[in-house]
Each structure stands twice: as structure tokens, then as C-alpha cells.
Image: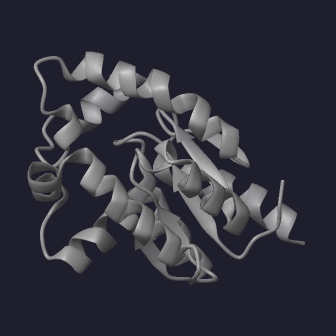
């Protein structure tokens, strides 16, 4: 595992990246960034609107630019969008500039957490479970390829996830 001033969280939508990221940043007393929220702030519109007008490719272009900018900042916790790992450039930036944590969660738990969330354009489909399974199969190898640490957020309370991450992170910083 590597030392780094930055912690980056990757994983599927609903895995807890924003929740865990905020708690980690608060505990470490460093800034927290959510790459999706940063895109929304920059554009003045929400992610579903970007998908509607620019498609997934347009959104991924914006996401790549944002990740490039955020990985230049030192001493942060960043939650990435679930699909940030799809682009090799993003995987490289995350891996080279931070301690990457893959927040793993099984599909049934993800479905439970996201089923009422209308802000997830990729789940606006007839069969959200099938879509999540497909995303999981496609992205899991990418998450694991850059992860310095993996933790299952589907079986632990968020405070326990944060404690375990901090234990690992602090042990390699010394």
C-alpha cells in the first residue's frame, strides 16, 4: 500500500462514497470533494440534465476534466462518480495521486439504497437490478485494479467502515 495525502473513494452508486467520504474528511480535518457535485456546481445543472442534453459521453468528458482538476489538490478526500473508473486516464490519475479505496457492496444492497433516487440516470430503466448487475460486472475489475484497499460497505455501519479505513490509512502514513 502507498502513502498519500489524498484519499479517493471508488465504487458503484449507492456504495456510500459520499457518506463515508464526508465522515473521513471530517475526522481527518481535511476538505471533502464529491466529483459529481463539483460538476453540478460548475455547470449549474444536475447530472441527469447533463445526461439528457450531452449523453453519457458528454458527462464522462466533464467528469474526466473534473477529476484531473481535483487530483491536483493535495490533502483531500474525494468521492468519485461510480463510472469514473471507465476511463483509463481517470484510473491513472486516481492511482498516481491518492490512496484509492474501493467501497464494495452487493447488488441487492445497492438496489435497496438507490431504488427511490431519481437522480441516477443509469438506473432509469425497466430493470434496475439487471442494470446494476451489468454495471457491477463491468466495473468491479476496474475498481479492484486501482484499489489500495477494499472494504464491504454492505455489511458494516458507516462509522465502522470509517474506523477500518482510518486504521489502514494511518498505519501506512507512519
Quadrant in the picture for residue 9: bottom right
Q: Position of residue 99 (x, y in %)?
A: 70, 61
Locate residue 120 relative to residue 66 in the image: left or right.
left
Residue under the point 19% across and 57% down: 47
For image coordinates 13% across by 25% down, the residue present is: 125
Seen in the picture, residue 158 relative to 2 is either above or below; the reply is above
Q: Nearer the viewer, residue 30 or 163?
A: 30
Estimate the x, y position of residue 115 in percent, counting from the top left.
18, 33
43 over 162 or under it: above or below? below
- Residue reaching furthest right? 174
Residue 23 position, x and y percent, is 48, 66
**Which residue appears at 57% of the width and 74% of the height?**
27
- The residue lying toward the viewer, choosing from 20 and 94, is 94
From this view, report whether residue 152 is shown above or below residue 166. Answer: above
Kindly identify the residue that appears in the image at 32 percent across and 73 percent down.
Answer: 38
Is the C terminus in the top left, top right, bottom left or bottom right quadrant? Answer: bottom right
Amino acid at each position: 500500500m502507498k502513502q498519500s495525502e489524498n484519499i479517493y473513494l471508488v465504487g458503484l452508486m449507492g456504495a456510500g462514497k459520499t457518506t463515508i467520504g464526508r465522515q473521513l474528511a471530517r475526522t481527518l480535518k481535511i476538505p471533502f470533494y464529491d466529483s459529481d457535485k463539483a460538476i453540478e456546481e460548475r455547470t449549474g445543472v444536475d447530472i441527469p440534465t447533463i445526461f439528457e442534453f450531452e449523453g453519457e459521453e458528454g458527462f464522462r468528458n466533464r467528469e474526466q476534466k473534473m477529476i484531473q482538476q481535483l487530483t491536483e489538490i493535495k490533502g483531500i478526500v474525494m468521492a468519485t462518480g461510480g463510472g469514473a473508473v471507465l476511463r483509463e486516464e481517470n484510473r491513472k490519475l486516481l492511482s498516481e495521486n491518492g490512496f484509492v479505496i474501493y467501497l464494495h457492496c452487493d447488488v441487492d444492497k445497492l438496489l435497496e439504497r438507490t431504488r427511490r433516487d431519481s437522480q441516477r440516470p443509469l438506473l432509469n430503466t425497466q430493470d434496475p437490478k439487471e442494470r446494476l448487475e451489468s454495471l457491477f460486472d463491468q466495473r468491479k475489475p476496474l475498481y479492484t485494479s486501482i484499489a489500495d484497499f477494499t472494504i464491504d460497505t454492505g455489511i458494516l455501519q458507516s462509522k465502522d467502515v470509517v474506523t477500518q479505513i482510518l486504521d489502514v490509512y494511518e498505519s501506512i502514513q507512519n
